[in-house]
Amino acid sequence: MARAPLTSQAVVLALEVPESSILATGTADPLTNTQTQNTIELPENAITQLEGNWGLVHGEPMTFANPGFDLPPINRLKAFDPNGRCVYKRVLVAVETNGHLQAS
């Protein structure tokens, strides 16, 4: 039986989003972000094939029943700070789910 050696290397997953696809940038206030998400009007070309080496990402959007309560612990865990040095940038982009276009 072959076994792979255990390593201490960390795996970091990242999604690079072209600036032209970003509808809004996240703030420190989850409720303001939610309001932006619920009121933004999607442009007609919200999802288009971009020039270059870009492709569609397949995944599952996450829904939070209470963003004001649910997001701060995740922000702390990920050291998310939109006003300081941070590895992450929270952005709003257009997604298609079940044939329906929405901001997520």
Image (cartoon, grey):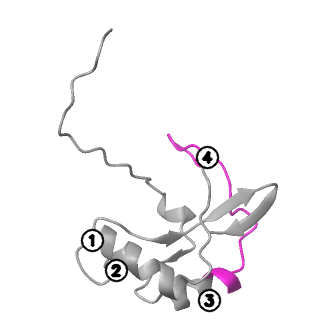
Label 3 sits on a secondary structure element that is helix
Look at the image and say whether residue 40 sits in the magenta stretch: yes
**Who comes first in sequence, dot 3 or dot 2?**
3
Q: Which residues are magenta?
A: 37-57
Residue bearing mark 1: 86
Taking 65 as reference, is 74 left or right? Answer: left
Farthest top residue in view: 1
| Spatial CA span between label 2 and label 1 | 7 Å
| Spatial CA span between label 1 and label 4 | 25 Å
**Who comes first in sequence, dot 3 or dot 1?**
3
Residue bearing mark 3: 35
Q: Position of residue 76 (x, y in %)?
A: 31, 76
* Residue 11 to residue 25: above or below: above
* CB atoms of marks 3 and 1 within 8 Å: no
Label 2 sits on a secondary structure element that is loop
- Image point 59% across, 75% down: which residue? 64
Residue bearing mark 4: 58
